[in-house]
Every structure is written in structure tokens, then in C-alpha cells.
Amino acid sequence: MLAAELEIQAFDPHAATDAAWMAVTAFRNAITAERFPDDPPKSWEQTRAELTSMPPFVDLHAWGVYPAGRAEIVASGVLVMLRTEENQHMAQFELSILPAWRRQGLGTRLLRQQAAVARAAGRRLLIGNTYGRVPAGAAFMQRIGATVGLESHINQLDLADLDRTLLAAWQAQALERAPGYQLGLWAGPYPEADLPAIVEMLKVTNTAPRGDLAMDDFLWTPEQLRQQEAALAHEGTERWTLYVRAPETGELAGFTSIFCERSEPTIAHQGFTAVWPQYRNIGLGRWLKAAMLDKILRERPAVRYIRTGNADSNAPMLKINHALGFKPYQAEQVWQVGVDRVDQYLAERPA
């Protein structure tokens, strides 16, 4: 089939039929099998729950490429813009194309749709990820003039290989090196009364390496956190957050979060682990990580793997993760390209 015979259609998650969801799910499962071959396929009900649970401050645009007359998707484009006070200059974009349909101009056609929406919204920068198992992604980014802003890896821990004596040692050492510090847990949604303190706590995530990405700090609001909580509940994801308080002041010195998805009972996803600079080098990061792994081992026996994303330049966190047994699972690059540069690329190609 010629590329000209393929139809690009906007996809509205809130208006899609069951048949459309089945086509979307089949496509997404095929793309996931290439990027993350160990992940189980998802049901169309789970896919629907995930894509209809976006918080209101997330502006999602999606397109599918369909062979004419067939309920099948061979490529997709997604553009996400956050309605936040900060980072109003940028949009996140993703292009996914089945291997048999690559090098036929579909990425360029989808990019044209994404750039038009981003430009109309006043966004000047597009940011997107590529994966080591799919070299076609990096090749396309290079063709459109994008540059790598951050080199990172998705690292994975096999709990069968975890040294449990290390967990006990790290927790004991923390009690010696950080006397008076208190560990606490938020299982599930954040307590409403703690939201102002949690907003301040989350600012520490802005100290993580961002490489050369033209990205400002994110400053979450209590209302945005409430919207995120509703999204997690809708899609069936449970979050645990362990935090540590400093003695005397009671200030939140650091935290770590883990996410368990109903559709992936054997895989848990590690979110941020962060400690404020003034509280570092007394073992709080190791304490948080060790205590969280202990909890998973006790209460989530089905979990076999823990996955986390780390910038390659984040030496302190990589040191902790490597000691625990995390190993590289997937190389990941974060690219950035100006919308003006994309327009130049598109102008050189037929519409």
C-alpha cells in the first residue's frame, strides 16, 4: 500500500468506540514489545483507563495513521502541552511507527500535525525521547535537526538478585548517622493537610540533572497534585511515598516514590528519590531506598522487577542503584528541537 493511501485521523480518547480502543491497544502493545520486550500486553480496557485519565492541566493531542478502509493503526503521533505557569515554551512529542511502515514519510506527516498545534499554542520547543532498542528513532531526530539534551538509561533491579543484608545494613547505618530523623509513609493519595508541605518537598526534584535541556523548574500546585491523584486512581496505579523528616524543624528532608500498576503486577516503577542538598551525605537516600524495597518485598510478593530512569550524569543516585544491583535495561535519549527548525525541515518536503 502506498503511503498516500494512508489516512491520518485525530484521536479523541473521550469519543473513541470500543473498536477504536482495540485498534489503539493492538498498536501500542506492538510498539511496547519492541521497546520493552519483557512487558506484558495490556487490555484495551486498561489502555482506555490510562488515556482517559489525563489530569485537566495536561493538554493531549493524538493522531493515528490508518490504512484506508481498515481498522488498523500503523503509526501514531502524540503531543502533550502542560497548562502550567512554567515551561510554557515547550511541548512533548512522540512518534511511533511499526517497523514495516518506517521510511515511508509517516513520521514527517505526523510531525507536520504536531508542529502546527504546537505553533498555534505558542510553543517554541519540542522535546521527545528515543530508545536504544529502536535506532530508527534517533535517526529521525537527527534528520529533523534535533539535538540530544540528556543521556539517560532505564535501569532495572531483579529482586531475586537483591542482597537483603544490604537493606538491613543501610537502615541501621542511617539510624547511626542521622539520629532523630523520622521516616514516614503516604500510601496512596497525599493527605490534604500535607499538600502545602508536599508542594515544597517536590521542588527538590528540580535539583536532578537536566543536561542541556532548555527546561525550567517545575513548581507544582496543590490543585495539580489533586488532579494527578485522581488520574492515578482512574488508571489503577497505586503510589507509595516514603519521606524523612529532619529533627527539631520537622522539615521534609527527602523522599522516594514507587508506582505499582494493576496491569503490571510483576513490575514496579521507581519514581523520584531526592534529598535536599543540606541533608545529603548522611545516608538518607540509602535509607529511603532500602526501606521502600523492604516494604515491596513484604507487601508486593508478585513484584519481580523494579525499573527506574536515571540521567547518566546523576552519579550519586547511580552509585546507590548500582550497589543495590540495578543494571542498564534500556538506553534513552531526550532530544530537543525548535519549532522553527522543524518548520524548515517540513518546508523542504512535500505536504
Image (tube, rainbow, N blue to C red):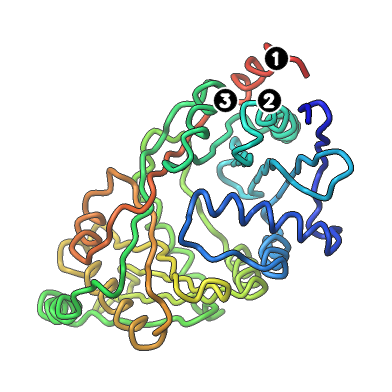
Q: Is residue 256 left or right of residue 175?
A: right
Q: CA distance from mark 2 to mark 1?
A: 9 Å
Other residues around mark 1 within 10 Å, as few (<14) / some (14–19) / many (≥20): few
Amino acid type of disc 2? Gly
Which mark is first along the chain, 2 or 3?
Answer: 2
Q: Is residue 72 left or right of residue 165?
A: right
Residue 256, given in percent of the width and then of the height, sits at: 36, 69
Q: Taking 158 as reference, is 119 above or below it? A: above
Amino acid type of disc 3? Gly
Other residues around mark 2 within 10 Å, as few (<14) / some (14–19) / many (≥20): some
**Labels 3 and 1 touching (C-beta < 8 A):** no
SS assignment at label 2 = loop
Q: Which residue is drawn at the image coordinates 73% and 54% (left, top)?
A: 24
Residue 49, given in percent of the width and then of the height, sits at: 70, 68
Residue holding disc 2: 105
Amino acid type of disc 1? Arg
Which residue is most to the right? Answer: 69
Which mark is first along the chain, 1 or 3?
Answer: 3
Residue situated in front as seen by the camera: 218 or 246: 218
Q: CA distance from mark 3 to mark 1?
A: 18 Å
Which residue is most to the bottom? Answer: 298
Residue situated in front as seen by the camera: 336 or 266: 266
SS assignment at label 1 = loop
Residue situated in front as seen by the camera: 194 or 213: 213
Q: Quadrant of the N terminus?
A: top right
Which mark is first along the chain, 1 or 2?
Answer: 2
Residue 253, given in percent of the width and then of the height, sits at: 30, 68
Q: Which residue is drawn at the image coordinates 35% and 69% (left, top)?
A: 255
**Labels 2 and 1 touching (C-beta < 8 A):** yes
Residue holding disc 3: 338
Q: Which residue is drawn at the image coordinates 54% and 72% (left, top)?
A: 261
Question: Where residue 349 is drawn, which disc sits there?
Answer: 1
